[in-house]
Amino acid sequence: MLWSGWGDPAKARELPEQVRRLLHDLLGVREPTAPAAALESVRLPPVALEPGQVRAFADLVGARHVLTSDEARVRHTRGKSTPDLLRMRAGDGTDAPDAVVLPGTHDEVLEVLRLCAAERVAAVPFGGGTSVVGGLAASRAGFAAVVCLDLSRLDRLLDVDTESMIATFEPGVRAPEAERLLAAHGLTLGHFPQSFEYATLGGFAAARSSGQASAGYGRFDDMVVGLTVATPAGSLDLGRAPRSAAGPDLRQLVLGSEGAFGVITRLRLRVRRLPAERLYEGWRFPDFQGGAAALRALAQDGPLPTVLRLSDETETMIGLARPDAIGGGDSGCLVIAGYEGSQVSERRSAAAAVLTGLGGEPLGTEPGEAWAHGRYSAPYLRDSLLAAGATVETLETAGFWAGLPRLYDAVRLAMLGSLGSPLVMCHISHVYETGASLYFTVVTAQEADPVAQWDRAKAAASEAIVRGGGTISHHHGVGRDHRDAYAAEIGPLGAAILRAVKREVDPAGILNPGVLIP
């Protein structure tokens, strides 16, 4: 993973000249005056751990699994949000951990957490490093040091139960490797978020991830049937049956907890058969309202495709559904419908009847296949835009169908009001019988302080989401960035409940301090 950007550095590319001219003419984007910092020039605070503390961690996991080099610290600094990358490109490594510790077993994780509690050292669980909500920047206040708990050594497929259709993994397995291992058994998770190429299974669970095929396979939290968790107070082993009436489901307390309640060390996941066929196609609707009504009809009355997405007029015009061919968009609103598994032809025909009856125009398979080809490319485009002098970031929410138009308008107006004349695009990418998600992409010219610029816009959008009745996050999580809005969403009593759980499982408060808990 590129330390100051997304993904494979070999896949990074400059924007075409015509796109640069369009950015300049439309938004006033200008080339940055200073180049991005090199890794060796990133400014890091001195290592705050005492030599004896470093040796104590080494005694637990082995000396070669405790890293204090500048490069290791830089590569484990923050996540991949636009503010994270802007700070790294400016050479700001102030949030770097003092050491990177790589445990190899559940028991080693337990011992590391106990040592952290005894020494007042904060611990930040780290999977693929793909957080976009400030989930990897712990607060240092009241702590002697901060260590990054890199889970990449916990990277095994432990068991496949083809009778129950459950696979047991360790948390550090990256999503492509999980799919490769399952494919050998004729199975798949079916979880393909935009972070797929680099994110880990433990990270998916800790952030309540939702993949692009959620209409067919469900969200990641739908897939989790069991969890093993290490906390400073001991271990939790959760999930004895698919469903239970034995009190509140504590699995739900761990899912989405972002490392604040414990470190997930084992996951038992529902799997599906590998699809016999995959087909993706495009449809055009005259406007966003009409397209949303068609998606609602499929979600409520069926048949529901495996993938179902709707871009608004601006996103369709820009062509953001095809990040590999940005600028080559069209009129109206683009729908992508994908079908995986069996009876694809029958399901496609039945859905086509619904879409046609509600005003949709079929575009054939070319738009769908183009989307599938570029489905993981958008973060690379974001990096190219940053390098060209644009501020570009995403935010997302979800709401019930009846309130979705008001929520859509509120967030757009908040972006326009805080940024002047930005380009604001949106799509629906996750649908349910009762509602859907809204995923916004915003592009504008960078100001002198682009981090403050986005902070201002994000605050306005968050307030609009809360006032508009939406959730502050559908699938990115809370982290530090959404913590205040999350507090408003759950109310004072909800926040007090979370703090009570935190005190019980993490009395010293060393787990990812400053993240999630209001």
Image (tube, rainbow, N blue to C red):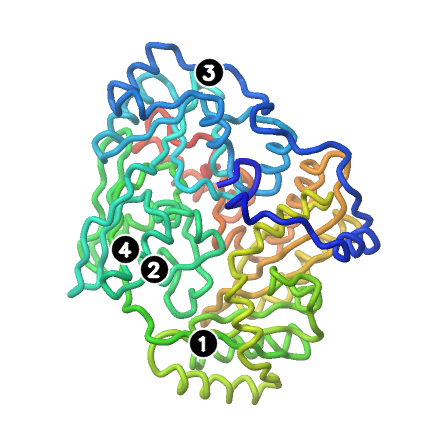
| Sequence-first disc among 3 and 4 | 3
Residue holding disc 4: 181
Residue holding disc 3: 47
Residue 91 lies in what quarter of the image? top right
Residue at disc 2, secondary structure? helix
Q: Is residue 330 above or below residue 381?
A: below
Residue at disc 4, secondary structure? helix
| Sequence-first disc among 1 and 2 | 2
Residues 292 and 506: in front is: 292
- Of tags 2 and 4, which is closer to the observer? 4
In the picture, measured across the screen, residue 111 lies left or right of residue 447, that is left
In the picture, measured across the screen, residue 389 lies left or right of residue 165, that is right
Residue holding disc 1: 279
Q: CB of mark 2 within 8 Å of CB of mark 3?
A: no
Residues 121 and 300: in front is: 121
**Amino acid type of the residue that numbered disc 2 sits on in the rendered structure:** Asp
Could you tell me how far apart the alpha carbons at marks 1 and 4 are, in whole angstroms?
Answer: 23 Å
Q: Pinpoint residue 32: horizontal percent, then vertical percent.
A: 75, 38
Residue 124 lies in what quarter of the image? top left
Residue at figure coordinates x 39%, y 70% from the top left: 216
